[in-house]
Image (cartoon, grey):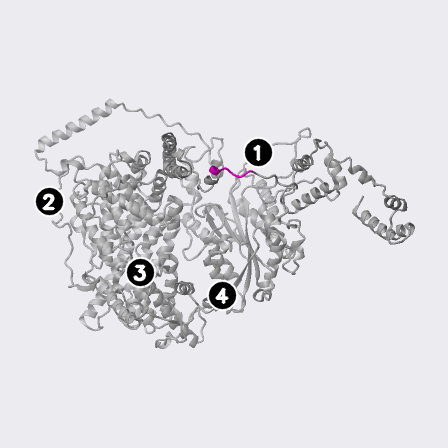
């Protein structure tokens, strides 16, 4: 009986009870009179009679049916077997021993027509929970906010990312034999994931897409040579997994969305609807949107399938069109293994067909956003309805007994999967607190054996990984070069089509491109051309060549141990005969190994002090610092010191006497430079040894980030040390331990804090402290000042590299002098060929010596001293151009290779050092100062002009020499290290030509540039801008750490002081503010205002910005607020280090044409953020500190061009 009949019958019975006749009641309520009469007389209905035959009562069945309906609405519809299981348990709970019949569920569905058996369709539980009525209503309520509701359709956008599988076409019907049920189809397709970021507007417009490939670099062979005009405006990027990340999302916002959606009215806000991915909620992303007047509206979590226009109207149709186009394209080109070219072709066809205005507008309509209709998503079958608490089972839960005491105690123990024996020891100690039985000898023995087995397996695994990586690298180098990386424009965020075409044209002009692949195939065997042993192979088909099988390589006959022993005996006899004929054991050429070398003074042409340098042309000066004296041999540092002292005096005068500040007066003292006086640690060196997995990961970091920039360590031979450290670290020799600790230390320095935590499970500072203590302990146990060899010297030089940017440069320069003395005592300044050493030892000594030259020049320059000329007392040749894999300790001879190798970067650095040593200029600092203190028309002025002319000729000569080095050793497609090497020459030339330009010939002459002091500021500003460009280039290969170590705070303090002294508007001011924006982006440590100098820099900048902001307002010019200014104010506000004031600081006087503002970005809105962010340029009342001198920081780094008498490190 239906619910409607039951309701009419109940109403008819009520009327009869009130006095209405049965006939009249049956007519009024449309109920059969006989049926009504039987009900009034108490005769049961058929359903009531049948209920007595049912195993469940009507009430129980109704409750079960309602529960199933609620579960379905929540996304947890019960399967048939579970539904019967619950019904059987209800029956058992009633005390019945009956079982449900086979067709019970069919009868149940007849009694409850609201239910039936359906086919399930899986959906992520997060989408079921996210798409609920409360979230949808809240989302639409946000459209009614005053800031959003008046934004028109043309300024409303929706952006999202979706993925496509390369090579996935239609899975439709095929034609086959009629008697078969199905037919198997071969699958040659790849399963590479590529994601696309699309953005559409509310009026149907489409922005340029961003294609994100899975990979490391964008390759040229991914793009077709013809018919590629459609990709001209597309953007291309790569990521390890083919998905977007924080960096890509921010670059897309800046390079695609902001410029392509910029409204004509600068006061118009835009609305961007996103799915709330983590990359959309970063501080940088949201701040960039705020600056450019973009409101962000995030969809509720996991609700894009019912609320996002792109999902509802575009993506499904786009994917279907792509699969169809890909299948047709593969058939037309008869390519069984399609790649990225076919993918791009298919996607552009699908995009042209389906990403059209009709589908876009349909998506906005289906989501209920435009026109506004929230009932659209609310009525979706994917929206959850019902009570969330209705997820419990239809029967009452049986009471459960309380948990035992042991289980309650165990719940407090944090049990995690142990990764090493140390983790097992920690777990055992935790368990001992729960139960003392875990501390008994049997339990300890069990844990110890399990830990030993775990460590053994870790060692075996890491050793296998090292060997696999080594063999993989060797295989990649042995294969012919087929991939052609696209070198991106450093000034752009993404790769574009014209860059691909430019690189292809360049390779074609140089004889590269596809012809290289064909020529490699013609002269190679099947194995090294990538042949799959199927004739003809796919590579030969592509190259249109004849596929011929290769001949197997003959097996090399192995020499017996007796033959090797006889050869060694002959060598010893020959050496003994030579020794007898010469009769002098002191001859250095007779020594076969470094153990028998004579390092007496007669064997070395170097002077007794080991440092030969020209006498300084100036007297220098003494400055007072920290209660003592410091000698400055450089006029540059004298000039900068004077400027900083003046600035300190101004700041001290403004200091409030009653102000207290929580900041540190100076950086914490470093224990890294006390190596000369340190004693051996009392702790066991085993406490500092890294774990096997840490050694392996740090070794990979060293090979990728450190060794390409120094090339002191021979990778293949040092791998044996790494494997020994992972397998048996306790029995390692002390000198090997020292080298291991230095490799780990410098590798940790190259990591960021997050990378160190994720890779090592250690904080970066803790890892640096541990490996530094281990290195000191190993060196002092060796008594390294008396007992030294090449591993010890390599460890010391790597230690010097690790100190860059972390320790006092004066102390490190003194320490480098000790390292130079050790190198002289080892005779490293003498070429190994003259000392009779093996080719391998000779090559390693050359690499170490030239690295020492670079470090000594850099530390001398940054310590305010003129660099020493170590080359004048040495005859060690330059290292050869050869990769590590191409020579070994057993090599009988080592010859330089023709063409690019992994030595590209250091070969360029060696050439820079050699040229600077050959062209020493005593008056170079005067050129850098821009003629400061020189009057035109005087003899000094004429000498200055003559020096400028000499510098111009040297710059041209230097350009020519580096160009030749680039042609010999560098390749644009050789990876990040080659790209960095190719960037050095234009970078150095740019700085050199800035210094060569007289101030009267500079474009700023007469406006920003009026005297030598302005000229010095122009040169120094250009140098720091070049440093930022170097950061951007080095960031492409995770090499930026090496250049960030050259950063020194005094350089920024000097520029900040110039902002106070100079005009607040004009080109120089614009460039300087952009420069500080970049420095705060790359150097996160500047945000730590507990450091006194960081706080002083922040206050100087905010004070300068206040003056600039007031000046721009007086000129009625737009205010382009740098990104770091609001964030800096927030940091100071949270620390309580400033308070608002009604007093505006007076702006400085401006000269002539300097009263010009150069800003394009719109101003901040009034209601965007409360308090501080509403007015990012509010005036501040400043008060500075008075507890230390401002010169506590390190000396700033000099330009990379390095004045022809120094070099800037790497």
> Counting residues from the N terminus, which is met first, the one under dot 4 or under dot 1?
1
Numbered disc 2: secondary structure: helix
Which callout, 3 or 2, points to the residue nearer the camera? 3
Label 4 and label 1: CA atoms lie apart by 59 Å
Q: Which mark is residue 601?
A: 2
Which callout, 2 or 4, points to the residue nearer the camera? 4
Q: Is residue 404 magenta?
A: yes
Label 3 and label 1: CA atoms lie apart by 69 Å
Q: Are marks 2 and 4 in contact (CB under 8 Å)?
A: no
> Counting residues from the N terminus, which is met first, the one under dot 3 or under dot 1?
1
- Compared to residue 12, the image places residue 950 above or below, namely below
Magenta span dominant secondary structure: loop
> Counting residues from the N terminus, which is met first, the one under dot 3 or under dot 2?
2
Numbered disc 3: secondary structure: loop
Query: Can I make out residue 969 in this image?
Result: no
Q: Is residue 1009 magenta?
A: no
Query: Can I make out residue 564 in this image?
Result: yes
> Counting residues from the N terminus, which is met first, the one under dot 1 or under dot 2?
1
Q: Is 747 in front, or is 830?
A: 747
Numbered disc 1: secondary structure: loop
- Compared to residue 1086, the image places residue 119 above or below, namely above
Residue 682 x/y as whole percent: 23, 42
What residue sits right under mark 3 in the picture?
Answer: 664
Q: Is 315 in front, or is 458?
A: 458
What residue sits right under mark 4 in the picture?
Answer: 1169
- Identify the magenta region: 401-406
């Amino acid at each position: 009986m239906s619910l409607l009949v039951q309701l009419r019958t109940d109403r008819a019975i009520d009327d009869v009870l009130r006095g209405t006749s049965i006939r009249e009641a049956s007519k009024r309520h449309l109920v059969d009179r006989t049926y009504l009469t039987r009900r009034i007389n108490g005769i049961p209905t058929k359903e009531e009679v049948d209920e007595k035959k049912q195993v469940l009562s009507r009430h129980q069945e109704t409750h079960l049916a309602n529960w199933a309906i609620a579960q379905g609405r929540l996304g947890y519809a019960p399967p048939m077997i579970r539904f019967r299981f619950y019904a059987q348990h209800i029956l058992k709970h009633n005390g019945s021993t009956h079982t449900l019949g086979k067709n019970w569920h069919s009868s149940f569905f007849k009694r409850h027509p609201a239910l039936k058996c359906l086919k399930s369709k899986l959906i992520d539980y997060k989408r079921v929970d996210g798409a609920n009525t409360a979230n949808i209503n809240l989302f639409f309520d946000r459209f009614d906010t005053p800031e959003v509701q008046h934004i028109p359709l043309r300024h409303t956008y929706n952006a999202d990312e979706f993925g496509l599988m390369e090579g996935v076409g239609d899975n439709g019907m095929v034609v086959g034999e009629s008697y078969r049920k199905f037919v198997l189809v071969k699958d040659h397709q790849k399963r590479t994931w590529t994601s696309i970021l699309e953005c559409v507007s509310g009026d149907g417009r489409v922005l340029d897409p961003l294609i994100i490939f899975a990979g490391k670099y964008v390759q040229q062979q991914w793009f077709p040579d013809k018919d590629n005009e459609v990709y001209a405006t597309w953007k291309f990027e790569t990521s390890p997994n083919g998905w977007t990340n924080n960096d890509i999302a921010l670059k897309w916002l800046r390079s695609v969305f902001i410029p392509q959606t910029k409204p004509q009215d600068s006061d118009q806000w835009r609305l961007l609807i996103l799915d709330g991915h983590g990359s959309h909620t970063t501080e940088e992303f949201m701040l960039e949107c705020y600056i450019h007047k973009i409101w962000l509206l995030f969809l509720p979590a996991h609700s894009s399938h019912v609320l996002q226009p792109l999902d509802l109207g575009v993506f499904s149709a786009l994917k279907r069109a792509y699969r169809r186009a890909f299948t047709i394209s593969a058939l037309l080109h008869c390519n069984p293994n399609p790649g990225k070219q076919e993918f791009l072709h298919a996607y552009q066809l699908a995009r042209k067909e389906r990403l059209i205005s009709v589908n876009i507008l349909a998506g906005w309509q289906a989501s209920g956003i435009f026109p506004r209709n929230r009932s659209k998503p609310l009525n979706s079958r994917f929206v959850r309805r019902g009570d969330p608490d209705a997820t419990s089972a239809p029967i009452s839960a049986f009471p459960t007994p309380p948990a035992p005491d042991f289980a309650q105690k165990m719940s407090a123990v944090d049990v995690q999967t142990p990764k090493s024996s140390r983790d097992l020891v920690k777990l055992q100690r935790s368990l001992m607190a729960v139960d003392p039985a875990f501390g008994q000898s049997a339990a300890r023995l069990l844990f110890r054996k399990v830990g030993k087995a775990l460590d053994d397996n870790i060692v075996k695994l890491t050793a296998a990984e090292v060997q696999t990586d080594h063999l993989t690298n060797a295989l990649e180098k042995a294969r012919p070069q087929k991939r052609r990386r696209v070198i991106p424009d450093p000034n752009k965020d993404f790769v574009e089509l014209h860059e691909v075409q430019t690189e292809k044209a360049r390779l074609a002009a140089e004889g590269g491109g596809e012809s290289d692949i064909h020529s490699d195939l013609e002269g190679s065997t099947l194995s090294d051309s990538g042949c799959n042993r199927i004739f003809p192979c796919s590579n030969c088909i592509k190259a249109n060549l004849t596929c011929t099988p290769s001949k197997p390589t003959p097996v090399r006959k192995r020499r017996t141990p007796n033959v090797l022993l006889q050869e060694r005996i002959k060598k010893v006899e020959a050496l003994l005969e030579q020794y007898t004929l010469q009769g002098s054991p002191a001859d250095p050429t007779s020594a076969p190994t470094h153990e028998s070398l004579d390092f007496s003074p007669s064997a070395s042409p170097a002077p007794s002090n080991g440092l030969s340098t020209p006498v300084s042309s100036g007297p220098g000066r003494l400055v007072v610092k920290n209660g003592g004296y410091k000698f400055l041999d450089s006029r540059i540092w004298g000039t900068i010191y004077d400027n900083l002292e003046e600035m300190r005096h101004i700041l001290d005068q403004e200091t409030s006497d009653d102000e207290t500040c929580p900041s540190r007066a100076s950086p914490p003292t470093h224990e890294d430079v006390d190596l000369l006086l340190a004693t051996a640690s009392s702790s066991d060196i085993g406490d500092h040894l890294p774990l096997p997995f840490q050694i392996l990961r740090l070794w990979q970091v060293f090979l990728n980030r450190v060794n390409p920039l120094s090339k002191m360590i021979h990778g293949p031979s040092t791998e044996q040390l790494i494997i020994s450290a992972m397998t048996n670290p306790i029995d390692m020799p002390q000198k090997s331990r020292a080298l291991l600790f230095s490799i780990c230390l410098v590798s940790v320095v190259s990591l960021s804090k997050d990378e160190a935590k994720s890779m090592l499970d250690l904080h970066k500072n803790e890892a640096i402290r541990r490996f530094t203590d281990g290195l000191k302990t190993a060196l002092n146990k060796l008594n390294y000042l008396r007992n030294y060899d090449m591993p010890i010297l390599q460890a010391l030089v790597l230690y010097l590299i690790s100190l860059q940017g972390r320790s006092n440069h004066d102390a490190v320069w003194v320490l480098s002098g000790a390292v130079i003395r050790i190198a002289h005592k080892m005779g490293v300044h003498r070429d190994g060929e003259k000392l009779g050493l093996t080719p391998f030892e000779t090559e390693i000594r050359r690499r170490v010596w030239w690295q020492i030259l670079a470090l000594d020049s850099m530390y001398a320059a940054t310590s305010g001293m003129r660099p020493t000329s170590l080359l004048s007392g040495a005859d060690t040749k330059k290292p050869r151009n050869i990769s590590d894999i191409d020579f070994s300790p057993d090599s009988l001879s080592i010859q330089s290779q023709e063409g690019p190798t992994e030595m590209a970067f250091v070969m360029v650095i060696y050439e820079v050092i050699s040229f600077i040593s050959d062209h020493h200029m005593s008056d170079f600092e005067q050129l850098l100062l821009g003629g400061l203190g020189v009057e035109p028309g005087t003899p000094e002025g004429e000498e200055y002009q003559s020096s400028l002319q000499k510098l111009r000729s040297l710059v041209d000569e230097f350009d020519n020499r580096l160009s030749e080095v680039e042609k010999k050793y560098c390749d644009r497609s050789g990876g990040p290290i080659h790209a960095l090497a190719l960037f050095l020459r234009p970078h150095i030339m740019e700085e050199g030509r800035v210094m060569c330009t007289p101030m009267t010939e500079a474009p700023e002459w007469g406006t920003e540039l009026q005297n030598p002091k302005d000229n010095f500021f122009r040169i120094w500003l250009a140098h720091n801008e070049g440093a930022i460009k170097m950061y951007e280039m080095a960031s492409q290969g995770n090499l930026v750490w090496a250049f960030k170590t050259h950063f020194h705070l005094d350089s920024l303090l000097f520029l900040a002081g110039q902002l106070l002294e100079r005009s607040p508007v004009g080109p120089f001011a614009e460039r300087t503010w952009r420069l500080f924006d970049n420095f705060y982006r790359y150097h996160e440590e500047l945000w730590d205002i507990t450091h006194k100098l960081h706080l002083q820099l922040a206050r100087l900048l905010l004070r300068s910005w206040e003056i600039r902001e007031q000046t721009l307002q007086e000129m009625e010019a737009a205010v382009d607020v740098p990104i770091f200014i609001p964030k800096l104010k927030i940091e100071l506000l949270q620390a309580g280090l400033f308070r608002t004031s009604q007093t505006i600081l007076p702006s400085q006087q401006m000269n002539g044409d300097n009263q010009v503002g150069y800003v394009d970005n719109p101003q901040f809105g009034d209601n965007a953020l409360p308090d501080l962010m509403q007015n990012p340029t509010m005036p501040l009342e400043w008060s500075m500190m008075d507890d230390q001198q401002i010169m506590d920081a390190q000396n700033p780094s000099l330009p990379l061009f390095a004045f022809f008498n120094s070099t800037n490190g790497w």
